[in-house]
Image (cartoon, rainbow, N blue to C red):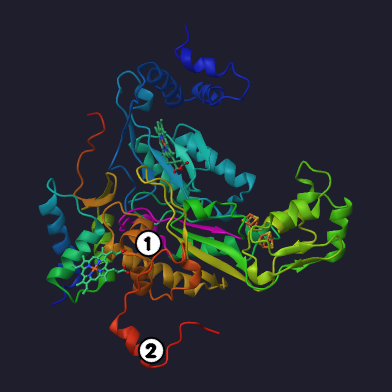
Amino acid sequence: MSDTPLLDKLETGPWPSFVKDLKRAAARKPAAKDLLRQLDRSYKDKITHWKHGGIVGVLGYGSGIIGRYSDLPDEFPGVEHFHTVRVNQPSGWFYTTKALRDLCDIWDRHGSSILNVHGSTGDMVFLGTTTDELEPCFAELTAKGWDLGGSGSAMRTPSCCLGKARCEYACYDTMDLCYQLTQEFQFDMHRPSFPYKYKIKCSGCPNDCVASVARADLSVIGVWKDDIRIDQAAVKAYAGGELKPRGGGSPYAKLDVKADVTDLCPTACMKYDGGKLTIDNKNCNHCMHCISLMPQALRIGTETGATLLQGSHAPILEGAQMSWVIVPFMPMEAPYDEIKELIAAIHEWWSENGKNRERVGELMLRLGMRSFFKAVGLEPPAQTVRTPRANPFFFWHAEDFEAEAAGRKYIKL
Amino acid sequence: MALSKEELVEFIYQLVLKAQGKKQLKAMDLQKAVLKEHPDQDKTMVKFAIKELIDTGRCVYTYFGGSFVEIPHEEGAAKH
Ligand code: HEM
Ligand code: HEM
Ligand code: SF4
Ligand code: SF4
């Protein structure tokens, strides 16, 4: 009889199953075989048989290795240790096949051969090895130019969309920013010293292909300041059906410019009278809806940079929170001093004030936006007001009176 | 008065040693404890003193829901 009767059933369904994949690995690797056997046992017992480790790692690093052990090591010796190695991915996840083969060979020699490319963090996730194999594996990885990613209460491996490598919407060079920030914060990636994890994700435009608004403590989302560029002849071609919506990527053969584009603009700032398309750009909130539908007719503006948002995380009790605008517009050009300095200031404030396991977004809610802005030296712009006029109180500080006496105006014209 | 590099490393090691088995300290707890006794100590020096303790293997990073600096000890979850 099969060792894994319950898992075997998963192979009978209409979809490709991870069981089939793992059985192939199991033919060569005892770890993969016992992984399947232990999982089948968990299905039967209805509890997990994994334990978390807290100590394993490579010398000098406090990040990148995540310890896992079986609680039934005598029954499943192949997974007595089953540690994960996080490997820092290249920006935008571009590899040569040679690089991928190197990585697979290293993991074949030092681990279970099971890979997850990629985990939600962005890293390559090498699943399942023993404590003894960690240092030799790390040595081979570094010899080929790879390094471990972040884990624990540390800077996590920054990640980004492929940006200017392939995408005309990219408002800044996401891959370069991601790489530069990865280099800048090496110390904090490998040596956990924060209250909790800190993730940076860089998207080139508000389509936000790396979902940074929901998954990053600091979301860097490309945006433009000036007007959407319009090619009226192409608008006509979309209306006439010569150009396909979404570059042919939608199920519709022909765009109804009024119904599909302008009537669905969330701020109702577009007009189309059957001839000319106009946009009231100061009311556009850069949602990308119109541009993504007719990319040949509409293009992002030319004065580009990024909006910085802070604080998304998904605590189990309070539920998910999205990032919140802290800087409406920042130019994003090498050497990126402004954003690097801001991140360092945020870390300082959070490390000083955060409790153990408190994400920066939680601290921001606990102490308030006001004290956050003050501490990191940012202006509080109107775009950060989440619910206008919900709070009737205004607290005056002595310095407000002084500033007014010195001529401060509240409305900047 | 600020400590020299060697004194600082030893000071931090003693903090970790005394806490071992009683309280898990994060890197920031160590920095705050140093600054309490030696307010003029440079923060970057504290970071590098911890790095030295880790690089020489006198201390290790551990992860138990958060990352801590501890004296190396047996992994509780491993079979022995
Ligand atoms: C019911 C069981 C489990 C649930 C619901 C669960 C859930 C999750 C979730 C939501 C993540 C984040 C996803 C990601 O980063 O890609 C994650 C990550 C992870 N899980 Fe699990 N997990 C389970 C079992 C396991 C087991 C059995 C292991 C190892 C033996 C494991 C090891 C890991 C590791 C190492 C990561 C980090 C992956 C990365 O770096 O991306 N988990 N888990
Ligand atoms: C510890 C002392 C006090 C507390 C906790 C307090 C609390 C409150 C609260 C909860 C309200 C209702 C607010 C609302 O309608 O949303 C209120 C209203 C009011 N309080 Fe007080 N109060 C205090 C002292 C005073 C004093 C000393 C005065 C006058 C000298 C005062 C005058 C008023 C007035 C006139 C209103 C009505 C305001 C309005 O309806 O617009 N209160 N107070
Ligand atoms: S986030 Fe924007 S720039 Fe980046 S790949 Fe997606 S659509 Fe392109
Ligand atoms: S980007 Fe969005 S808000 Fe701006 S004009 Fe297009 S549909 Fe309207």
* Outermost top residue: A1
**Nearer to the camera, A284 or A126:** A284
Q: Residue at x 57, y 24 (%)?
A: A17
The percent position of residue A89, horizontal first and vertical second, equals 52, 50
Question: Looking at the image, which residue is at 16% across and 75% down?
Answer: B2
Secondary structure under the numbered disc 2 in the rendered image: helix
Q: Left of A92 or right of it: where is A247?
A: right
Picture quarter with the C terminus of chain A: bottom right
A413 displayed left or right of A394: right
Figure quadrant, ligand 4: bottom right
Q: Amino acid at mark 1?
A: Phe
Q: Looking at the picture, tell me which residue is in the foreground, B31 or A398.
A: A398
In the rendered image, residue A407 lying in the magenta stretch gets the answer no
Looking at the rendering, the stretch of residues picked out in magenta corresponds to A185-204
**Placement of B14 over or under A9, stated as above or below:** below
Q: Residue at x 15, y 49 (%)?
A: B23
Location of residue A79 with respect to A412 vertically, above or below = above
Callout in the foreground (1, 2): 2
**Observer-nearest of A363 and A399:** A399
Q: Which residue is mark 2?
A: A404
Please name the residue shown 61% across and 51% down the image. A94
Residue A394's spot in the image, x, y percent? 35, 73
User: In this rendering, is residue A261 above or below A116?
Assistant: below
Q: Quadrant of residue B28?
A: bottom left
Q: Which residue is mark 1?
A: A187
Q: Pinpoint residue A121: horizontal percent, then vertical percent.
A: 47, 48
Q: Examine the structure image and report whether residue A189 is included in the region drawn in magenta.
A: yes
